[in-house]
Image (spheres, grey):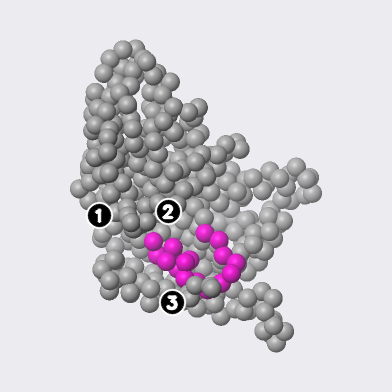
Amino acid sequence: MARLMVNVTDQYHALVAAGELRADADQARAVAALARVQIELEAVPPRGSTIWRFLRRKPEPARGLYLWGGVGRGKSMLMDLFFENVGINRKRRAHFHEFMLDIHARLKAERVQEKGDPIPPIVAALADEARLLCFDEMVVNNMADAAIMSRLFSGLIAAGVTVLTTSNRHPDDLYKDGLNRQLFLPFIALVKESLDIVTLDGPTDYRRDRLGSAQIWLVPNGPETTAALSETFFRMTDYPPEDRAHVPTLEMDVGGGRMLHVPKALKGVAVFSFKRLCAQARGAADYLAIARRFHTVIMVGIPVLGPHNRNEAARFVTLIDALYEYRVKFLASADAEPDHLYPQGDGRFEFDRTVSRLMEMQSEDYLAQGHGPR
């Protein structure tokens, strides 16, 4: 039996009344905007419905939203609440980075066919797959994405697709100071013309608030530290601990046809073991993909490092560089504190920078920063 969909406004106020969310004026305004989109989307009969026989023309698509504001203000949570309850069949939610990886893969396939401009068939395929596209954490870091976004999204909106996205940046600040940014300006104009811009920037960083006083670096490895990190994971993701056996996993495309299994992945928080990320043949591209995708990484089982496991140590250094570059929150259990993690031997001098970064990543200033490139 299909699950009964609920108006996003009622669902939000029910969560506030139950004490699961705090009353927040900015969030309430965003919910009102989301409710408008939900009503407009659900007013359109499903594709194939007999009602279409009586309609003289295709109804106007629902106008989309651009939710932006500081880190931890509830943008992703509200978009998820909306997506789960909007009663339409063709809808898709994706992290923006994952969506762009999919677009580049489709572009590559279209170019192999050599049938001309690859953008129109991609737009047509996406519009056929979904009439609602929800993107989490829109950010533009490279010219390749910037060059195609204006044409891609103008095509989607023209095809009647409703776009809803979250971002830490106002549209005017997307790809700020980027190479050849003038080529990206039409996309910014398109966003401001075609989507309602909604600010969600209240005084509380709920993501940092949920982290609370949790320890960032726990020693030594063992059942107690693992249990403490597990408790932090459930607090940050709102996932019920009693249902821990069903925590979602993710098969993550890290580019070049390589996949990475993420044992626990929910609401931008990922859990890995040291062995999975640093004992296997991984490189900078893998770690950058993780850093772009997750705002928080939890790692268990970090051993004491040294010349005896220099390859693992080198990968760990590269991982920390990537997480630091994207201001990812890093929680870990290890057999030693950072300054004793690589106690002696060849490579200790080079490891000092990693020690410095690990110490900074535990600071309040670092934890208060938003997720994204420096």
Image coords of residue 346 (percent x, y): 34, 12
Image coords of residue 349 (percent x, y): 31, 17
Residue on which the image places disc 2:
246
Q: Are marks 3 and 2 in contact (CB under 8 Å)?
A: no
Judge whether 92 appears above or below 319 on screen. below
Sequence-first tag of 3 and 2: 3
Amino acid, disc 3: Asn
- Circle on res. 7: 3
Along the horizontal axis of the image, is 369 left or right of 190? left
Q: Between marks 3 and 2, how big is the CA–CA gap?
A: 27 Å
Amino acid, disc 1: Asp
The residue lying at 35 percent from left, 63 percent from top is: 200
- Under circle 1, the secondary element is helix
- Circle on res. 61: none
Amino acid, disc 2: His
Residue on which the image places disc 1:
209
Quadrant containing the N terminus in the rendered view: bottom right
**Which residue is the extreme one toward the left?**
213
> Which mark is in front, 2 or 1?
2
Sequence-first tag of 2 and 1: 1
